[in-house]
Image (tube, grey):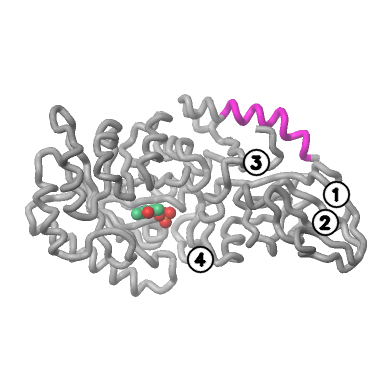
Amino acid sequence: MFRDTVAQVDLGIIRDNIRRIKASLPSRVKLMAVVKAGGYGHGGAESAAMAELAGADMLAVAYLDEALELRAKGSALPILILTPIHPAEVMVALEHELMVTVTGAEWFRQMAPYRIAAGSTALKVHVKVDTGLGRIGLRTQAEWDELVPWLASADVEFDGFYTHFATAGREDTGFLERQYTAFLEMKAWVKASGVEARHYHCAGSAAALRFPGLAMDMVRIGAAMFGFYPEKLVHSVKLRPAMRLRSCLIHVKRLRAGECIGYDNSYIAAEDEWIGTVPIGYADGWSQSLRHSVMLVEGQRVPVVGKICMDQLMVKLPGFCVPGTEVVLVGAQGDETITFSELAMLLGSVPQELSTALSGRVERIYSGMEETGYENDIARGCLARERVSQSCGDNQTA
Ligand SMILES: *Cc1c(COP(=O)(O)O)cnc(C)c1O
């Protein structure tokens, strides 16, 4: 790709983060790396490869298509699909050795006609229960009892039983404790019904890092592997963000006091000012709601001015800068750093909303492969792209 705006992803940091998370947990606890939404915007297959290298036991994605993409790119670990798939698609899951999430007996009833029994391997199932997030999952013992015969059947492997916390990133732990207690009660239903799940799991990143004692058999780590975690509440582990988002000034001009910038004259210069244009906009995932944010130019924080356009936005510069000067939207430049967390705070959101919003128009460029010594097609592909970008991109940073 030929754009000046690129997301630089350090795969060594992703690998390191996972190693640190693993080291903070009891050694018997397995780690499921959650690489849905293209590895939270960092690259699904690439993140999965790093997770495997760092010792992850399983992968998870949200949808069947995401799992198929990982298989096509060579991920060999067990993969759990977190959102129930259509019962009619069961053979696709079996063919690619994917584990499915089930929330009730109705799924099995609908699935049965689509399953070609002869010779096919057992379907690995994780049962999802709702203990308070209110999203998906069975809630009552009657629903559980109805499910048991299906789980006990010879062509089903009951691989997991899990729930998801609603408030693990919040300081107050009351609701988390209630959910955990509810999960323990549901776990007792399983034990009493004569079937046994291989893995009980409830903790995502925040819960696993804050309360390793809740880990049970496995933790499901997404955000934290990319360096997104509630830093103020976690003291045992230090993680680093893996993505840097950079661009450059493509146009620099002097504005006179009273002249306008942007659609709807959304900014009017108060005095004579230097204005730079940066080639990123809302079609890249840089939402208009970031119009009051800042970026780094020559090591200084500079404000966005005017409404963010589809493909470009304008910043107010401290003085003249040559076109081609590097602009850092996320990451470090000089002594300054802007994080996804900082920007998310501004929007009342979470860092992964911003990283996953980065569209396919923003190329991901990978580094950190060399030191991993990881040799496969994904790694070679990443390195080839890295070389190309260095030869045509770096001359633009003055
Ligand atoms: C996305 C997701 C996770 C990962 O959560 P993080 O907070 O990003 O670690 C874990 N479990 C389920 C069910 C999820 O949907």
Q: Nearer the viewer, mark 4 or mark 2?
A: 2
Residue that appears at 40% across and 29% down: 72
Mark pair 3, 1: CA separation: 20 Å
Q: Are marks 3 and 4 in contact (CB under 8 Å)?
A: no
Crowding at label 3, few (<14), some or many (≥20) Cα neighbours within 10 Å? Answer: many
Which three-letter amino acid code belongs to the residue tagged 4?
Answer: Lys
Quarter of the N terminus within the rendering: top right
Is residue 159 rendered to the left or right of residue 32?
A: left
Q: Which mark is residue 252?
A: 1
Mark pair 4, 2: CA separation: 33 Å
Q: Nearer the viewer, mark 1 or mark 4?
A: 1
Is residue 213 rendered to the left or right of residue 196?
A: right
Label 1 within 8 A of ligand 1 by Cβ: no
The residue indicated by pointer 2 is: 317
Q: Secondary structure at mark 3?
A: strand
Q: Which mark is residue 241?
A: none
Q: Is residue 36 above or below residue 121?
A: below
Which three-letter amino acid code belongs to the residue tagged 1?
Answer: Val
Quarter of the C terminus within the rendering: top right
Q: Earlier in the sequence, mark 1 or mark 2?
A: 1
Q: Are marks 4 and 2 in contact (CB under 8 Å)?
A: no
The residue indicated by pointer 4 is: 232
In the rendered image, residue 365, in percent from the top left (x then y), is placed at: 60, 36
Whether residue 216 can be seen here: no
Q: Earlier in the sequence, mark 2 or mark 3?
A: 3
Looking at the rendering, the stretch of residues picked out in magenta corresponds to 383-397
Mark pair 2, 3: CA separation: 21 Å
Q: Are marks 1 and 2 in contact (CB under 8 Å)?
A: yes
Which three-letter amino acid code belongs to the residue tagged 2?
Answer: Leu
Q: Nearer the viewer, residue 345 or 112?
A: 112
The residue indicated by pointer 3 is: 6
Residue that appears at 58% across and 65% down: 347
